[in-house]
Structures are given as C-alpha cells and as structure tokens.
Image (tube, rainbow, N blue to C red):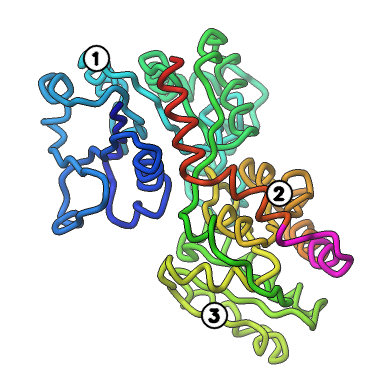
C-alpha cells in the first residue's frame, strides 16, 4: 500500500510536525509514503526518509499526474488560498481515495462563531473586524448564513468529494458535525473522524527528568493575536508574584517583543523568567523534561504539538478553553483549563495547576504513559491506514 500526503506549503520544518511525522509513521509500519507539494527553493537538497514529489500548481491540476501517481490514498491538507474541491476531483478521477485532513478546530463557519472573535475588538480595530462583529451580534440568522454561504459551499464541496474527513480533537469534531447539520448536510457526518496529531519519537521514547518548579511557554510570539502574547506575559508576571518558588522559561520566535513586555515587571519577577529565543526542535525535549507544566494561552489551536510533546514528557498543560487543549488536559488528568479566555480565568488555572503539583495530584510517569501510545506516530499512522481500508 502507498499513502501520500498532499500539502502545498510543505517545507523541511514540517518534518517534525504532522505532515512529516504521519509519513514517517506510515514507513515505520511498513507502508510506502511520500509527500506531494508545490515546488519551492526550501526543498533544494532536502532528502528525508520519505519521497518528496515537487510539482507546479498547473501540473497538479493535470489529470495525467494523478492517473500516473501510484498512491492508493491521498491525505489532503486543504490547498492554501485556492479552491481545493477542484483538485480533489482530479485526485478522485485518478482513482485515489482522499482523506481530507482539516488541521482545524472545526469552527468552519456559521452557526459557530469565528475564532477571530476571541480577540478583543480593541486589538483589531479595523473596519472589516467591526463589520464582522456587527454581523455576528445581529439577531437575524439569515444575514449570517448569507455572509458565510460562499465559504461554506466550498468547504462542503471538499467534504463531498473526499472519502473521509479527519479533524484533530473530539471537540473540533463536535463543532464540525454541528456545522454540517446546521447547513443541512447530516449525510456527511458519517465521513468525519477524530485522529490526533503525532509527536516525534524522542518525546515518546525519551527519559523523563526530575521535575522542578519550572513552567514553560513556547510558541510563535510574533503571532500576537493567536498566541495571545500580551496576555501571556501579563499572566506569567501575575503568577510569579503569587508563586515565588516557581520560575518560567519562555522561548520561541518573536521573543524580542516578549522581552519588551517584561520591562515593566518587578525585578524579583524578571529574575525568575528565562527568555531564550528560538530553540531547535531537537533541544526542546531537554527543557520540558525537567519542567512541571506547559502554559498555552492561545486563543485557538488546531491541535498544539507543543502540548502533546510536553504531555509525553510528563508535564501537565495549562491553557485556554480552546478545543484541542480541552482534549489534551483530559478533564484535569493531565492539565487545567481556564473557564474563559480572560486573564483572571487563565491566572486561576495556572495557580490551580501548580497547586495540583504541590498536592501530589500529578504523576509525570503516569501522564507520559497515558499519552505516549496515543500520540506515537505509528499509532496515528495505523489509524489512517485503517481508515483507508474501511472507506
């Protein structure tokens, strides 16, 4: 069997994320795998264990390419910035099964509120955002349906042409099914499936360090709206004022902005915050292995690989009530989720999670033992292989 992954924006950085790890998991399980993508300079001299097929968009829209490709199934990530349903038709015409991988929280469109509305309006004072908020507040459902009609039609066409639809958390699946029912497509719900994203083997197989009073936050901090950078810094400062026995390690891209935001913190707080900038993926394990908790203040996440890696390292996670984080906290077994996206709620979750560690509620070995088999790339790949066989 050969299963290929189509991801038009694939670059080497995606090898440690789900597009690459699923392909490697398939290979681990004895399945032939490759990645199909649009040609780009980043892939010059890139030679992973799986094959990489580079084509232009025009070549990918050519019927001959999919007829000649030897894959039984395509794991298809939605084409970025284009109508993907036409390309799925080409795949199907070439005799392929298509597993549409949404990489999403299921908030496709009405009747679910757009995730961007989780960003306070004061942080996005543009005419477009103001109009969007106004439309959402209006009581007339017909206005909202009309506004989302074109986007919805394309999303539903993609699902119609696909053999199965994969989404990354149970709550995201519930959102997706609600969306389909609200638009009169209950018939498509039988195609939808929850399969989480995998983590790399070093997190599944590595030793768990001695846990100290260390909390970690890492992400793309320049992505201010999504990663909630400002609130992250405010909450970390407030937490460290309460818990003087804890220290925070903050790393990732965009940490210059984090440092600027920390300038107003008291010196005794700044002394316990270690801002390290970008860290290579292979070195992340060394940090989270000795930490107790990972702080994820994101306003939305499709899955949160960072959280999955931390759990496999015996950490708990503390986060907002985003769909994926609710799943990964496992109702308090492996984390604490804030009641709302407000600073006070998130601070309360951080303090509560630290208290759970104080009281011996968490066992790092048990957290890791629970999550490692679920998030092992071989497990995820097997779920996809079974889906191909049964659709």
Q: Looking at the picture, does residue 158 appear above or below residue 107?
A: above
Residues under labels 1 and 2: Cα distance?
Answer: 40 Å
**Can residue 81 be seen?**
no
Residue in front for this viewpoint, 331 or 350: 331
Residue in front for this viewpoint, 164 or 73: 73
Could you tell me which secondary element the residue under label 2 belongs to? Answer: helix
Q: Looking at the picture, does residue 18 appear above or below residue 108?
A: below
Q: Residue furthest front?
A: 30
Nearer to us: label 3 or label 1: 1
Q: 10 Å neighbourhood of mark 1: few (<14), some, or many (≥20)? A: some
Drawn side of residue 389 relative to residue 178, left or right: left
Nearer to us: label 3 or label 2: 2
Q: Which quadrant is home to the N terminus? A: top left
Position in image of residue 192 (x %, y %): 52, 21
Drawn side of residue 159 relative to residue 216, left or right: left
Marks 1 and 2, the one that precedes in the sequence? 1
Residue at 51% over, 63% down: 219
Residue at 42% over, 25% down: 151
Which region of the structure is painted magenta? Answer: 352-365
Could you tell me which secondary element the residue under label 3 belongs to? Answer: strand
Residues under labels 3 and 1: Cα distance?
Answer: 51 Å
Position in image of residue 334 (x %, y %): 73, 53
Is residue 20 magenta-colored? no
Q: Find disc 3 in the rendering and name its residue.
A: 275
Dominant SS type (magenta):
helix
Drawn side of residue 70 relative to residue 384, left or right: left
For the residues labelled 3 and 1, say whether their Cβ atoms are less than 8 Å apart: no
Position in image of residue 80 (x %, y %): 32, 38
Q: Looking at the picture, does residue 372 appear above or below residue 238?
A: above
Nearer to us: label 1 or label 2: 1
Marks 3 and 1, the one that precedes in the sequence? 1
Q: Find disc 2 in the rendering and name its residue.
A: 329
């Amino acid at each position: 069997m050969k299963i290929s992954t189509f991801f038009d924006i694939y670059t080497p950085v995606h090898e440690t994320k789900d597009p690459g790890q699923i392909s490697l998991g398939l290979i681990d399980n004895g399945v032939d795998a490759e990645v199909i993508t649009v040609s780009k300079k980043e892939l010059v001299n890139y030679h992973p264990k799986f094959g990489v097929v580079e084509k232009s968009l025009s070549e990918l829209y050519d019927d001959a390419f999919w007829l000649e490709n030897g894959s039984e199934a395509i794991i298809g990530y939605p084409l970025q910035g284009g109508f993907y349903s036409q390309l799925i038709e080409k795949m199907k015409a070439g005799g392929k099964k298509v597993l549409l991988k949404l990489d999403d929280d299921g908030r496709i469109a009405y009747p679910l509120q757009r995730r961007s509305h989780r960003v306070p309006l004061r942080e996005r004072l543009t005419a477009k955002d103001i109009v969007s908020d106004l439309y959402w507040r209006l009581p007339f459902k017909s206005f909202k349906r009309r506004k989302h009609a074109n986007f919805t039609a394309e999303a539903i066409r993609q699902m119609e042409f696909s053999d199965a639809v994969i989404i990354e958390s149970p709550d995201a699946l519930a959102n997706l099914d609600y969306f389909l029912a609200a638009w009169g497509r209950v018939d498509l719900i039988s195609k939808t499936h929850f399969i989480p994203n995998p983590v790399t083997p070093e997190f599944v197989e590595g030793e768990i360090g001695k846990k100290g009073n260390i909390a970690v936050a890492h992400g793309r901090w320049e992505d201010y709206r999504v990663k909630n950078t400002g609130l992250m810094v405010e909450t970390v400062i407030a937490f460290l004022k309460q818990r003087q026995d804890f220290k925070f390690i903050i790393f990732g891209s965009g940490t210059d902005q984090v440092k600027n935001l920390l300038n107003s913190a008291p010196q005794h707080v700044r002394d316990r915050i270690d801002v390290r900038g970008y860290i290579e993926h292979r070195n992340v394990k060394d940090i989270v292995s000795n930490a107790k908790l990972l702080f994820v203040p994101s306003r939305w996440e499709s899955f949160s690989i960072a959280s999955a890696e931390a759990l496999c390292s015996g950490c708990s996670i503390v986060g907002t009530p985003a769909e994926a984080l609710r799943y990964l906290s496992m109702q308090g077994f492996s984390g604490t989720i804030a009641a709302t996206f407000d600073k006070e709620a998130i601070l309360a979750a951080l303090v509560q999670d630290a208290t759970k560690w104080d009281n011996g509620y968490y066992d790092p070995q048990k957290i890791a033992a629970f999550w490692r088999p679920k998030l092992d790339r071989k497990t995820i790949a097997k779920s996809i292989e079974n889906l191909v066989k049964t659709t």
